[in-house]
Image (tube, grey):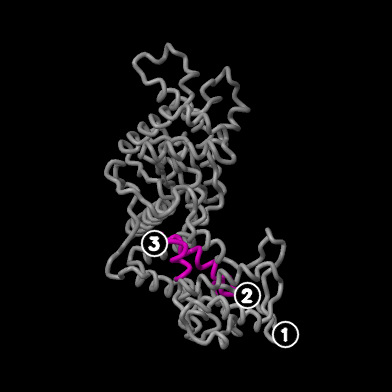
Amino acid sequence: MQKNPEKDETPQRPEMRQRASDRTPRGSLSRFETSAAATAQDATSSDAEDPERGGGRVQVDDDGVHRPFMRGILVHSLTEHGLSFEDAYAVSEQVWKRIRERQLVAKAELRELVSELSASAPGGDFERLDPTFEDHLYVEGKDGRWPFTQGRIQQSLLAAAVEPRQAFEVVVEIERELRIRGDHTVTRDAIRTLAGNILKRRFGEASARRYHGWRAFQNEDDRPLILLLGGTSGVGKSSLALEVARRLSIARVLSTDSIRDVMRVMVSDDLVPTLHVSSFEAHSRLVSGRLDGLDPIIEGFLEQSRTVLVGVRAVIERAITEGTNTALDGVSLVPGLLDVSQWQDRAHVFFLVAADEDRESLHGHLMARAQGRGTRGSERYMRNFQEIFHIQENLLGRAETSGVPVVDVQDLESAAEQVVAYVVDQLGERHAAEAAALD
């Protein structure tokens, strides 16, 4: 369903969060699993070689001429024959499941399969449907010419903070428009203009602005993007960091847990005892004489964080030297302890805190984690839940004092859209400010 173009429905910015007591519970998506739409996006982003099945791209035999099977083209053909996008998308997924283990499928057989799977859907004469196109689209840019690739364009659209399924719909519409025009070669700028217009019409001005801003950043800015995502143990920081990295094509994703593990090998337990336990257990390794009038749980957590931040700073410096976009998540990323302004001239560093302020929700997630595969000793999370929640409250207070945005992670899909929107909006504002300063 298309959104009203007169209404700019944009994701809530992370800093505009609500307290848990004021929230309306979400019931749409699993909290820490990528949505079905995102999973579908992964399946449709490219029909190229799949290493897990060991084969190459599925080819369609059209009277001895072999062409690659493209689900997006099939979706386009089905919509041209009267199916809704949703029905066409569902049929194309079923077709792909039937043929993905094969290297070659006859065009006539493919047409029969499409007709069979489309029998329950309203539409036209599928016996005449052409699931392939004889003509090929090519994109031309400063760096050469290459085949039109749905996955490549869809990936760039995710920076507009739209859902993966919505991004795929835009790609299908872009390809349909290009084929109606009849041009076999189109410039990259023409595709970007078309994509921006479709985003604006479907989702509003902000989505189009983010898309164009992100493309400008990728092509004109040499400074790397570094995303720092703090939050208490078990809240879902790593899941969120991975999802955002996927949408923004961030090549490197690290956790402060890994930095802490390396430092543990190099620094003995006797020298820094708080480094060798979890953040919620660090208070047990403090020297009691130093705790007069202080909160031992928070002091232990902060002492460990200060130590790990030595490694965090080194990772950030390395990313800047290499020019590598990087996402770093971890409980040791504490507002007030890390001043990101020191890198503002050499990188785009964004600091956010992930939180689940609903006590029962966070407890339920930790319980599920303790019972699942790869628990990483998660039973300890349950035994120390009070300490974990207490650390989160401290992080939220520090975030508010330091002006660090907080993103609610109960819904991973929504949280990822919020973070993407925030990051891309901030990049656009910085670019505009720098341009104005030059004028």
Q: Is residue 137 magenta?
A: no
Residue drawn at x 51%, y 31% is 308
Considering the numbered disc 1 on the image, is that residue within a helix, a strand or a loop?
loop
Q: In this view, does 17 lie to the left or right of 144?
A: left
Residue range highlighted in magenta: 140-169
**Amino acid beneath label 2:** Phe
Residue drawn at x 48%, y 68% is 168
Q: In this view, does 21 lie to the left or right of 42?
A: left
Q: Mark 2 points at which residue?
A: 69
**Amino acid beneath label 3:** Arg
Query: How far is mark 1 from mark 2, CA to CA?
Result: 15 Å
**Closer-to-camera residue (279/144):** 279
Q: Mark 1 points at which residue?
A: 64
Q: Name the residue under label 3.
A: 210
In the image, residue 77 sits, relative to residue 291, either above or below, namely below
**Quadrant containing the C terminus in the rendered view:** bottom left
Q: Where is residue 44 in the image (x, y as percent from the top left)?
A: 55, 66
Identify the mark nearer the N-term, 3 or 2.
2
In the image, residue 81 sits, relative to residue 426, either above or below, namely below
